[in-house]
Image (tube, rainbow, N blue to C red):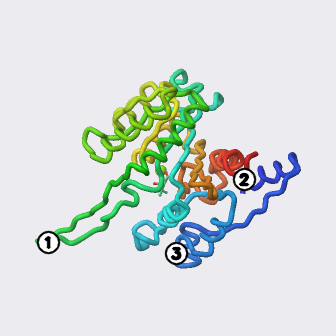
Amino acid sequence: REVRRVMHWVEYAYDVTFNVTEGLIGGCAYEADGMPLSDGTLALARASDAILMGAVGGPQWDGKVDYTKRPEAGLLRLRKELDLFANLRPAMCFDALADASSLKRDLVAGLDILFVRELAGGVYFGEPRGIENLPGGGRVGINTQRYTDAEIIRIAHVAFDMARKRGGKVHSAEKSNVMESGLLWREEVTKLHAADYADVALDHILADNCAMQLVKNPKQFDVILTDNLFGDLLSDAAAMLTGSLGMLPSASLGNGGPGLYEPVHGSAPDIAGQNLANPIAAILSFAMALRYSLDM
Ligand code: IPM
Ligand code: MG
């Protein structure tokens, strides 16, 4: 609702018109259609230049709805179907909020980090997955972390290209000390860097150390390149550096199709309906849509 107000202002101030259609995703879609993303909504999304998403999830569906029909599954389907592999999550600290951060002002004032999170692969989508009964009794939960060289290279390109337009520095975060997928990640990023991006500074960092460095000395970072799961965790941590989880927008880009723009935060069910939610991440997501999808 707040984004629509800003949109109207942009239409008025810049003499442009946005053609907006609305579709349901998440819990409301589940209630209406029995699934968190209908084919109709997906088709609408595909036919758009940019997709603005609110947030999904709520306690009324947690553990009560089949796993493949939970609100989050709708969002994951949207990302996967549109092959939105590049998730850009800028974490900037506005000066007025520097005192709201859980870290000291001088650590966060002027902070400007860009997360480049791989969004269409990794453990979120890897097969096999599931919960199975063990022959001797008991159960096992299975998820698979899986990355091809091509998936790593295409997201690394995005990180290096972004770094060139910013501070010229990329930290690539993985767990190559314990995971083969992390080792491949490190090798491919190293190769691509040597071949095409020698002008950009590259540091490899273990993802756990990256978490520590984010709260110890966050301003050392410019672009952080990481996989789907680590990017989910690290970007939430970075959100708190900026003073509020309500401040972080994101853009998810594929190969020339529509971009998806959504706040990093969730649906905040604890304050639903009270007009208390911070709309800034949603508004900044619209700003990213103007920049990356609508060329404005
Ligand atoms: C995010 C969210 C999602 C994710 C959830 C809602 C599926 O936490 O965009 O960071 O885990 O990717
Ligand atoms: Mg998250």
Q: Which sits earlier in the primary sequence, circle 2 or circle 3?
A: 2
Q: Which sits earlier in the primary sequence, circle 1 or circle 2?
A: 2
Q: Position of residue 156 (x, y in %)?
A: 47, 42
Tell me if label 3 and label 1 are in contact, CB under 8 Å.
no
Q: Residue furthest top?
A: 106
Q: Position of residue 188 (x, y in %)?
A: 38, 41
Q: Say which quarter of the image contains residue 130.
A: bottom left
Secondary element under disc 1, as helix, strand or loop, is loop
Label drawn at residue 35 = 3
Q: Position of residue 49 (x, y in %)?
A: 69, 58
Specify the amino acid type for callout 3: Met
Residue at 40%, 57% (x, y): give it: 124
Label drawn at residue 2 = 2
Name the residue nearer the viewer: 72 or 39.
39
Q: Residue furthest bottom?
A: 33
Specify the amino acid type for callout 2: Glu
**Whether residue 186 is situated above or below residue 18 in the rendered picture:** above
- Asked whether, in this view, residue 67 is left or right of residue 40, the answer is left
Label drawn at residue 137 = 1
Quadrant of the snapshot with the C terminus: top right
- Asked whether, in this view, residue 49 is left or right of residue 155, the answer is right
Secondary element under disc 3, as helix, strand or loop, is loop
Q: Indicate yes or no: mark 1 CB to ligand 1 under 8 Å.
A: no
Quadrant of the snapshot with the N terminus: bottom right
**Whether residue 241 is situated above or below residue 79 in the rendered picture:** above
Specify the amino acid type for callout 1: Gly
Residue at 55%, 70% (x, y): give it: 37
